[in-house]
Image: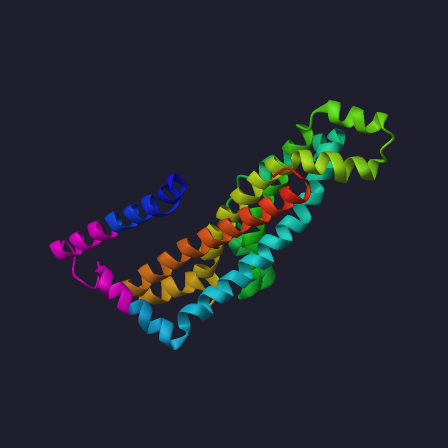
Amino acid sequence: MKTAIRTILLPAVTFLVVLAAWHGASILQLYPEHLFPSPLTVAKGAEEIFKTGELWQNVWVSLLRFAAGYGAAAFLALPLGLLFGRCLLLWSAVDPLIQVLRPVSPIAWFPLISLWFGIGNLPAVVIIFLAAFYPILLTTVAAVKNVPPVYLKVAKNLGASRRKVLWDVIVPAAFPQITVGLHIAIGAAWVFLVAGEMLGVRSGLGYLIIDSRNNLRTDLVIVGIIFIGVSGLVIDRLMGLAERWVKRQWGAA
């Protein structure tokens, strides 16, 4: 009962309070309807693009771009993080370069990315890659470095090979911290996906928002914002399910 209250009832109450406040603000008409639409107007706008298929097409395109960029970042950053975490001399050589590049916003790269890769899907995917790569890499390196040395000594004393130590000791021990980086990267990648779609493509949720703004359809702007948030939440929850499944395979959950 307490779990149901915490996971269902309380979020529902929060949602209703926000909805009521939004509706109340729209009734006060502090701004014209076309600038600050009511929840009902937004719902009608959502129904409009839902029926035409425009909404789901843009959601699907954004998800595909996210999967490509985030997947490529994880595919490269995870093994590099394991390597750098184990080989501290190599990490000392590349760490200054990583720390110089890491603070640079992916959007700052967009002029060069558009020159190198043109306009279309690829620049958006590259921006997502840059946003996700550094959180995954740095948390993986830190996670591997934080594996208790006693684990490695015990495995070595038992005659475990290097490969066995990596997959049966280091990866399971580092996994909880690695997943933190994966979750952080989801948020960063999703934010910059939308920013990338606002700059150089003609599809996706970011494009939906910009195109709707240009046509003074603030109801559709809000629809796009809502679906950005909902999609990000769903992705994060799916990542959590995958994380728990992996832990069960290792007998950790």
Query: Quick check: is 47 in the magenta stretch?
Result: no
Could you tell me residue 34's position as x and y percent? 21, 64
Q: Is residue 175 left or right of residue 7?
A: right
Span colored in magenta = 19-44
Could you tell me residue 90's position as x and y percent? 75, 33
Identify the residue at horizontal 29%, vertical 46% (top origin).
14
Farthest residue to the right: give it.
Answer: 159
Query: Quick check: is 43 in the magenta stretch?
Result: yes
Task: Say if residue 223 shows up in the picture.
Answer: yes
Disc tally is 0
Task: Say if residue 216 shows up in the picture.
Answer: no
Quadrant containing the N terminus is top left
Q: Is residue 146 left or right of residue 64?
A: right
Identify the residue at horizontal 58%, vertical 41% (top origin).
179
In the image, residue 128 sits, relative to residue 143, either above or below, namely: below
Q: Is residue 57 left or right of residue 90?
A: left
Identify the residue at horizontal 67%, vertical 50% (top origin).
75
In this rendered view, identify the residue nearer to me: 185 or 13.
13
Could you tell me residue 141's position as x and y percent? 66, 35
Secondary structure predominantly adopted by residues drawn in magenta: helix
In the image, residue 12 sits, relative to residue 221, either above or below, namely: above
Residue 36: quadrant of the picture:
bottom left
